[in-house]
Amino acid sequence: ELKTIKPDVIIHQSKIVSVLPNVFENLKIEKRKDNFYISNAWFYEESCSAGGLTEYFMPNGKTELLVQGQGVASLGTTDIYAEWLGIPSSGSDMGINDSHTFSSKFSISPEIERWGTNLFIYKKLKKHFWFSILIPFENISTNANLKEYDITGARPEGLAPSNDILFYEEPLNVSQALSHPLMKYGRIDNKKHQKAGLSDINLRLGVSKKFQNRILFDFYTQGVIPTADKPNAEYLFEPILGNGHHFGIGCGFKFSANKDNLTFLSSFDYLYLFEGTEKRSFDLNNRPWSRYMAATLNLPRSRPERLINYLTQDLIIRPRSNFNALFAFDYGIDKFHFEIGTNIQCKSSEKVLLKDGWNESVAITYYQDENADSLFTGPTWNSSYSSASIDKPMITDVGADSYYTTISVNDLNLDSARSLNSLSVNPYFNMGYDGKFLNSVFNLSSGFFYKMNSNNKSLGNFGFWLNCTISL
């Protein structure tokens, strides 16, 4: 008898990539001319290491940011000036006589929860060839868990400003500023966001070779068909089904060798994802989180809004290569099987390109000292703002520089929108039972895994699954 190698069950997530381990149920198959298998796996997993991942989303590798107005006696190094976020101070308006005393700290702790089912169909063809299709259905929930604390100097909610100088949205704190509806993209909040549907469908065509009735090789080619919607970048940590709507091709092989009751299992899988268009947000060069600064468009300058509304574009994304490897041992006692192993995943860095041209009239907001209600409408924009950043105060002295510039395409840091290379190790344990029902062989198995990462670019996860396979 041969141990039949089952396909790997992979769950992908753009930016956050999670892998359910390859589960080899080791179903004992009766020798027959044709084989047809149907398998269904129910799974659940959730994240467990948001602290490290926070550094991936926050500027300068921090896990907590300090937001202060320009009139605050510094409580520490300012990470974000409140004026950039349009947060009113404790006074009645944001004029030059106001104190700008708002201050708070905030952090994010990203979480992800995923559950669903994977339907797998396998058909053995003539001359050792076989075909399989994996159809996954997923429900994904994400939560950035924005937490704000140590708030001082906030304008009371019932006190209306005498004029709407910076932003007509008038957020009273960081939580309101980073999730306001007038910010079209990149919002951050502490609410759960959910998406459900078909993920990427995986098709494989392979050939099996057996030796001495105890060694089995499987070689295959594969293709990935995206079925889910593209990401829309409305939230910083949005739920994404599949690989972000990218087609893919690849190949791989599996190896199984058994002696008595012990079986060694291994597989190597390569998948290349082709380029596609995704909407993503990015920053300016050497200015982390500059996407949340204030900006205006066209001449005469319009009322300011978030720069992220312009720094979110349709980008050409090339995910490129994904590698998966598995090594495991299975021990069988009568009809029971106990399997322990590890899944290793390596993902290459993405390539990111701007799909369309850049609007050269976009500029970082500049205000006059003496007439804070209006924007300066000169023919060009203030050149001192070519180096403006969210951790520096707004320049309000209009006489400091008589030359003006806008944001050029060379100022755009597209790399801030890409997913970097990552490596994860996923040890797992699986237990199964083989049986017969109405002359059909079936297998029931269940297991759990824990995902560990070599860096803070993806979440550590743990999860479990229940699988049922039947041979018809």
Image (cartoon, helix red, strand yellow):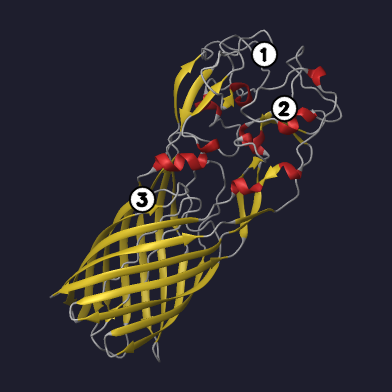
Residue at 48 percent across and 51 percent down: it is: 240
Q: Which of marks 2 and 3 is nearer the N terminus?
A: 2
Q: Which residue lies furthest to the left in this view?
A: 334
Q: Whole-Å distance between the Cαs marked 1 and 3?
A: 49 Å
Q: Does 215 sit above or below residue 277?
A: below
Label 2 crowd (10 A; few <14 / some 14-19 / many >=20): many
Q: Which of marks 1 and 3 is nearer the N terminus?
A: 1
15 or 192: which is nearer to us?
Answer: 15
Q: Residue 461 carries which label?
A: 3
Residue at 58 percent across and 56 percent down: it is: 350
| Labels 2 & 3 near each other (Cβ < 8 A) | no
- Tell me, yes or no, if residue 392 can be seen here: yes
Q: What's the amino acid at mark 1?
A: Asn
Question: Helix or strand or loop: what does disc 3 sit on?
Answer: strand
| Labels 1 & 3 near each other (Cβ < 8 A) | no
As drawn, is 411 to the left or to the right of 325? right
Residue at 24 percent across and 67 percent down: it is: 339
Residue at image mark 1: 163
Q: Which mark is residue 365?
A: 2
Q: Whole-Å distance between the Cαs marked 2 and 3?
A: 42 Å
Q: Earlier in the sequence, mark 2 or mark 1?
A: 1
| Quadrant in which residue 138 is drawn | bottom left
Q: What's the amino acid at mark 3?
A: Asn
Residue 158 coordinates in the image, percent (x, y): 52, 11
As drawn, is 441 to the left or to the right of 382? left
222 or 266: which is nearer to us?
Answer: 266
- Tell me, yes or no, if residue 472 can be seen here: no
**Mark 2 or 1: the one toward you:** 2
Residue 108 coordinates in the image, percent (x, y): 45, 35
Question: Helix or strand or loop: what does disc 2 sit on?
Answer: loop
Residue 149 coordinates in the image, percent (x, y): 44, 22
Residue 126 coordinates in the image, percent (x, y): 40, 90
